[in-house]
Image (spheres, helix red, strand yellow):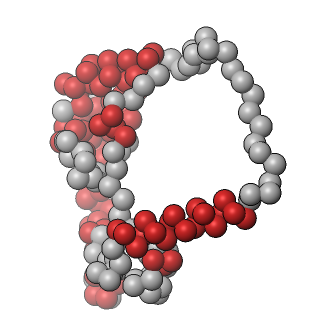
Amino acid sequence: MRCEYHALLLRKREQFWQAKVEAEKSTPRQLWRSLDAVLGRGRVQPSEDVNAEQFHRFFDDKVAGVRSATADAPPPSFTSTSLEASLSQLQPMTDDQVIAAVCALPDKSCALDPLPTTQLKAVVDIIAPFRIALFNRSLSSGTVPDAFKAAYVTPRLKKPDMDPADVRSY
């Protein structure tokens, strides 16, 4: 069933792109825009003039500004909970849920991914039991592996026409 779904998905994607190319073949400029958008090209890259230190300083200053602007606000109120509180509303995951979640992922990956998404989808049936054990253990213990807490942050301009040399543009 899952193999049929993947085959159908591939056919539908191919049909979509063939129709898109056919519809835009008389306007090469639009066709190139579509192609560039799919490939992620044409995006303005962060300026070489802006470095991590400047971003850090900018966000530190921004946080300090928010804190000073809200210094006179009343402190937040919290309701305490018992030490016996648990995540009992969460249910263990099943094979089908994990496989469906993996199949729904977009076909793109991050440098931190140990296995590219396309390859993960190809072997999801084989590794689903391991993923289920990992997810369910994480739910029952209330912890997440440290490897899942890392991220790469890529600055993106808020709007394409903004100045890439100004940290406020990101």
**Left/right of residue 162 with respect to residue 52 in the rendered view:** right
What's the residue at 22%, 26% (across, down)?
Answer: 127
Is the N terminus in the top left, top right, bottom left or bottom right quadrant? top left
**Left/right of residue 37 with respect to residue 87 in the rendered view:** left
Identify which residue, 133 or 40, lies in the foreground. Answer: 133
Identify which residue, 137 or 41, lies in the foreground. Answer: 137
What's the residue at 24%, 31% (across, down)?
Answer: 124
Q: Is residue 118 visible?
A: no
Furthest-top residue in view?
84
Q: Position of residue 100 (x, y in %)?
A: 37, 33
Name which quarter of the figure residue 165 lies in: bottom left
- Residue 142, relative to residue 118: is it above or below? above
Q: Position of residue 73 (x, y in %)?
A: 80, 54
Q: Position of residue 34 (x, y in %)?
A: 33, 75
How many labels, in total? 0
Identify which residue, 34 or 143, lies in the foreground. Answer: 143
- Residue 128, relative to residue 66: is it above or below? above
What's the residue at 77%, 37% (across, down)?
Answer: 77
- Residue 127, relative to residue 21: is it above or below? above
Identify which residue, 104 or 17, lies in the foreground. Answer: 104
Q: Is residue 127 visible?
A: yes
**Left/right of residue 102 with respect to residue 142 in the rendered view:** left
Q: Position of residue 28 (x, y in %)?
A: 28, 87
**Left/right of residue 70 with respect to residue 66 in the rendered view:** right
- Residue 162, relative to residue 129: is it above or below? below
What's the residue at 33%, 73% (across, down)?
Answer: 51
